[in-house]
Image (cartoon, helix red, strand yellow):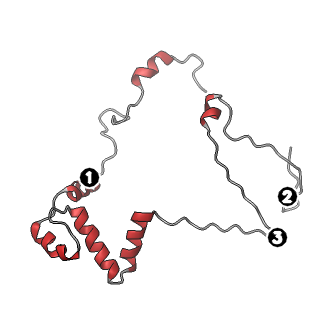
């Protein structure tokens, strides 16, 4: 049960703020390996590696991320489907999943999705979804809907 007499005046100063952990002392979510990778990708790659990759289009002052991008492109050109898929996913985004809806009966189902500006709905405090039953047709298993 919600508090019938909330003290709203105390909530504003103590609300969670971006960059601050929700629990004092927790430090937030730890991802040391990801952080280390991100730092390494920003660093300049060793000169001997850059020199070896320059004939494939790597720049003289390339970072680790740029060297790896060139190496992955080289692998894709050699026929690696994994490398080609990785490049396509990173540049064009992952392809959408195909969803297939099946029915016991052989009839067409049309699904229409529309998007609207919900800021008006949220500011008016009205529900975002308002669904009402249109009919009381028989359900597939022979049961009637309860209304």
Q: Which residue is disc 1 drawn over?
A: 35
- What residue is drawn where x is 23% and y is 55%? 36
- The crowd level at tag 3 (other Cα within 10 Å; few <14, some 14-19, many 20+) is few
Tag count in the figure? 3
Relative to the observer, which residue lies in front, 116 or 136?
116
Picture quadrant of residue 49 = bottom left
- What residue is drawn where x is 85% and y is 58%? 139
Quadrant of the snapshot with the N terminus: top right
Q: Which residue is disc 2 drawn over?
A: 139
Q: Does residue 81 appear left or right of residue 31 in this picture?
A: right
Q: Which residue is disc 3 drawn over?
A: 105
- The crowd level at tag 2 (other Cα within 10 Å; few <14, some 14-19, many 20+) is few
Which comes before the other along the chain, label 2 or label 3?
Answer: 3
Quadrant of the snapshot with the C terminus: top right
Picture quadrant of residue 88 = bottom left
What is the secondary structure assignment of the residue under circle 2?
loop
Q: Marks 1 and 2: in contact by CB < 8 Å?
A: no
Q: CA distance from mark 2 to mark 1?
A: 54 Å
Q: Which is closer to the viewer, label 2 or label 3?
A: 3
Query: Against 20, is 144 above or below?
Result: below
What is the secondary structure assignment of the residue under circle 3?
loop
Q: CA distance from mark 3 to mark 1?
A: 53 Å
- What residue is drawn where x is 33% and y is 34%? 20
Query: Against 48, is 5 above or below?
Result: above
Q: CA distance from mark 2 to mark 3?
A: 13 Å
């Amino acid at each position: 049960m919600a508090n019938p007499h909330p003290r709203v005046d105390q909530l504003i100063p103590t609300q969670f703020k971006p960059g601050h952990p929700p629990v004092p002392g927790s430090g937030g979510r730890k991802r040391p390996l990801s952080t280390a990778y991100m730092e390494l990708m920003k660093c300049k790659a060793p000169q001997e590696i850059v020199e070896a990759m320059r004939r494939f289009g790597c720049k003289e002052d390339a970072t680790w991320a740029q060297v790896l991008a060139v190496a992955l492109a080289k692998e894709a050109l050699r026929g690696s489907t994994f490398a080609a898929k990785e490049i396509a996913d990173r540049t064009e985004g992952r392809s959408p999943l195909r969803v297939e809806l099946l029915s016991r009966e052989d009839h067409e189902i049309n699904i229409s999705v529309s998007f609207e500006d919900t800021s008006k709905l949220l500011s008016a405090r009205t529900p975002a979804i308002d669904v009402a039953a249109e009919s009381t047709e028989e359900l597939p298993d022979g049961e009637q809907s309860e209304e």
